[in-house]
Amino acid sequence: MVDVEIRRDRIILRYKGKKWDWILEPRYWRNTLLWTAGLLVFPILCYFISPILLNTVVNANLYAAIAIPLALMTLGTGRINFGPNFFIGVGGYTAALLSIAYGWGPLKTFPFAVLMSLLSALVFSPLVIVARGLYYVLLTLLLPLVFMEITFIYTDTFKGDVGLAGIQLLLNTGMVKVNFLLTAYISMILMLLYLWVINKVIKSRYGLIMATINDGEEVAHGIGVNINKVKILAFVFAAGMIGVAGWFYAHYFGTFAGITYLPLNFMIKILLVIFIGGRAQIFGCVVGGYFIAFLEMILVVTLGEIQPVLFPVILAVLLFTLPEGLFGLYRRRRYREYLPTLHVRR
Amino acid sequence: MWETLQVVLIYTFVLGSIYLLISLGFSIICGVLRIFHLGYAYLFTLTVYLAWMFMKELGFGLVPALIAMVAIQFGISYLIYKGIIMKYMDREEIILTGLLLVSIIVEQAVNFRYPIQAGVFIQTTLVEGSSDIGAVVISNQLLIGAGIAILLTVLFVFFFLKTRTGLAIRALSQDIYSSQIIGVNVEVLYTVTMFLILIPVIVGTLIVAPVWAVDPTMGSLYFTTAILVAILGGLGNIKGTIIASYLIGFTHAAVSFVVGEPRFMNFSALVLVMIILMVRPQGIAKSEALW
């Protein structure tokens, strides 16, 4: 028998020990809904204003889609991974190589890209337990650089300097503008899906356990949390999600070059999406993703050749002047959720 | 067989010594400040390109250009210490990302002004030509460089073991709070350390600049080696750094001359580091203190 309980702010349904909440109080969902609606309208606006902007929207969504799982990884492992782009490389190269070798489309390469990202994460997952202090930072920083070197060593396979070409495209409707629009929406759905899933995880019991690990491993251990299991799960799960971004890049551009995604320049962009967005708050990652993608595009258009120099200068200024990132400005006067501490050494 | 062994041994000595020079500064800063100088790569790039700028743009001779370069490097180090490291000591993620950004800004600025096509070259060759040691032919510049690396390391060890300042820096590397209690001026010593690390970096870069490739991204390559050595040796321990430099040198030499695949040099070194970290998570050194 379904038991219905009506409260002032929500309706609660109970059935055989399970519970569903339907929140009525607008302050809990109004802003989320407005922001989501705004995001969903944005690509259409770009389509009519200037379709070139759609590429920036895709980049923004993908930056956020990489940063959101990285925020989860940071929370769950209790330390910052300085080489998330390694998993972009794994996912991207898996999709690219399979697509070129067997002529597979994105749907066929997807499970393999995810699987390879998960497997590679599992192989390197002992690092979250073994590597203490600053060693974790150093080793994670090195992983993508060494991977890049491998792509140069086996240049016959990976085409290290020029990248792999001839990958089947994500979409091909025959109309370039429509392709861009649909791709922007697919990337947005991917990003929003990540946001929704990870928000659920963070608000669940596991999120609480991760927050405990992040705040104090000894305390978490003391209250009976299997720290190693949670750390490895957070690392592998988030890495799989980051790998999907690599798969997306490969099928979106139809080419994939490690030299674009594996160097420090790309990694620092993702870290800054997290820091400037909102210090590992997942909603801040969306703000950070859009801010950095659009800032980069505006600087490219307005400054030309000097953009690579001024872009990091502006980011450095923002890094030092926004203690809680852009999202922190919004959160300052509103309800504040758990703000994870960012640990470098554990 | 004997010839291969000779080649491996000599290149282990030469490469290991050069790597020691490249990574000594990084190791010291890790040991003393207990932070990670992720902007370390910019030091190498600036050494070459500032000297070149003074010679090319302002018409300086080699020696005045080098003196001006050193002065500017000291100034930048001081600004980085005051503006980033000291200010954000309790927010390590900001320090690391900020330092990395500094490195990227320098690399991009250099690349903007002097792209690889500019053909930057500084004539800091000490001895021309090459020497035959047994069956091995090796550049005299690298041999001299290896000698200078050992001499400089001995001087650094002597400084840390036998001088009062060195003793205070070692105390600082062991425990900052206890050092403050016994009257160590932390801020001054941190600044001294920031200056000290410049010496091996600048000397090392000037030695290898005429022999190895010079381009705006050269810093990242040397930085990778410095990271590997520092991790393997145990962050901040000079004894560990010395052993690790030669171990990485041996790995590079063996992969190049025994396996015959120089392209695998960095990859093999990373595998070695990972294997050793599995057995000894704190690296080769017994402690994280400076000595």
Image (spheres, rainbow, N blue to C red):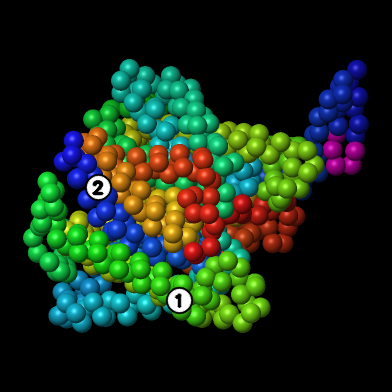
Residue B18 place in picture, x, y as percent: 28, 58
- Residue B98's label in the rendered image is none
Residue A80 place in picture, x, y as percent: 56, 49
Q: Is residue A48 above or below residue A276?
A: above
Going by the image, does A164 lie left or right of A140?
left
Q: At numbered mark 2, what does the secondary structure look like: helix, strand or loop? A: helix
Q: Is residue A10 magenta?
A: yes
Q: Residue at point 53% right, 62% down?
A: B289
Res B217 seen here: no
Q: Quadrant of residue A329?
A: bottom right
Q: Amino acid at mark 1?
A: Lys
Q: Is residue B278 magenta?
A: no
Report which residue position mark 1 lands on: B162
Q: Point out the stretch of residues depicted in magenta.
A: A7-11
Q: Residue at point 19% right, 59% down?
A: B142
Q: Amino acid at mark 2?
A: Leu
Q: Residue at point 59% right, 46% down?
A: A74
Foreground: A1 or B207? B207
Q: At numbered mark 1, what does the secondary structure look like: helix, strand or loop? A: helix
Q: Chain of mark 1?
A: B
Foreground: A78 or A337? A78
Report which residue position mark 2 lands on: B9
Magenta span: predominant SS is loop
In the rendered image, the residue lying farthest to the left is: B129
Residue A293 place in picture, x, y as percent: 44, 51
